[in-house]
Amino acid sequence: MDAYLVLENGKVFRGKRIGSPKDSLGELVFTTGMEGYLETLTDPSYAGQIIMQTFPLIGNYGVIPQDFEGDCFAKGYVVREICDAPSNFRSEGDLDSFLKEKGIPGICGVDTREITRMIREQGVMNARICSEVPDDLSEIKGYKVTGVVAQVSRRDIKDFPPEGKERFHVVLFDYGAKRNIIRCLQKRGCRVTAVPHNMHADDVLALSPDGVMLSNGPGDPAENTQEIAQIRHLLGEVPVFGICLGHQLTALAIGGSTYKLKYGHRGANQPVKRLSDGRTFISSQNHGYAVDIKSMDGLGTVSFINANDGSCEGMDYPDKNCFTVQFHPEASGGPHDTEFLFDRFIKMMEDGRDA
């Protein structure tokens, strides 16, 4: 069945339908990972966006539910070629069937290389996956990704027990948290209490946590004024570790600012440089906004920068007992390059008990 990918700049790409047969509108972004399409599709940080894979063949190892990071909130999926005969001993189905089950429309058979180059040169843009090319592009041009943290966050409070003996109790603000953040804490002896995005700081402190974790999530960080206010109240009260959106919200709570990147950093091969010793790590990332380094003068210490464009990838706030990173240490990009950051968080909680 024919389908079209229509970009807001008027470019039209004809391909074949995959996934749900419905039309869909979203912000078109590309991700450069050669593997990990299941983690990508189930990352809540893609809420409101149409995901395009730059690697040409997707779906070759099928669908493995144990690898899911959360629910699927993507608006659409674009690939060059989809594999309809996956081969993997863990596979429980094919990718096209998964997309249909989740109600995610997609398109294959388009030149993803050309589209990626267009986004790199012109910047991220909106697009529609549809059965007929619209005459009027105003709806596509007017689309905005808004209110997505409330959409993807959990509604309840849930405890996740530690592996083995409990050493620490961590409260995790769920802004669209990936499951492996919880697993990384559990295997270090942490009982994790996951709470909704809008829980009040006083209610969090009433749970008597040893530390607070600020998760990843979708959308424009500056939109989340209530969440920023709660982080501001928590800083200095308990050790805090923020990842991705949590990193951006903390910078805003401290008094810094954020801005939208031209086309974002998405994929499992993003290099970050640690400024303390010059060492470079390969990281997994998924974000379209960044912390403005200049706005952080006197507010904290930049710990990591992106080796490609020099943007902020990490901040330390020693006087607030807090540190944050833009990339995903739980995603095992190297495959374990930056998991040591969880050990740093554990040490902060240990020191907090000894103080």
Image (cartoon, rainbow, N blue to C red):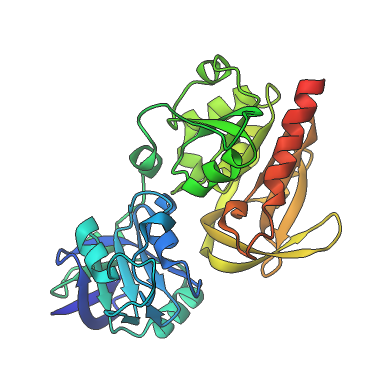
- Lateral position of residue 345 relative to residue 118, left or right: right
Q: Residue lying furthest right in this view?
A: 277
Task: State the quadrant of the N terminus.
Answer: bottom left
Q: Is residue 174 visible?
A: yes
- Identified at 53% across, 33% down, the residue is 172
Whole-percent x, y for residue 12 in the image: 26, 80
Please determine whether, in this image, residue 265 is positioned above or below residue 174. Answer: below
* Quadrant where the image shows the C terminus: top right
**Vertical comparison of 186 with 311: above or below:** above
Callout count:
0
Residue drawn at x 30%, y 64% is 92
Along the viewing direction, whichever of 18 and 306 lies nearer the viewer: 18
Left or right: residue 93 versus residue 215 is left
Looking at the picture, how far across and down is residue 100, in whole percent? 20, 63
Residue 249's image quarter?
top right
> In the picture shown, does residue 296 fall above or below 88?
above
Residue sitting at x 72%, y 45%? 315
Residue 209 picture quarter: top right
Measured from the top left, where is residue 136 in percent x and y? 18, 68
Residue 271 relative to residue 75: left or right: right
Residue at 57% from the left image edge and 49% from the top image edge: 244
Can you see residue 320? Answer: no
Q: Can you tell which quarter of the image residue 238 is in?
A: top right
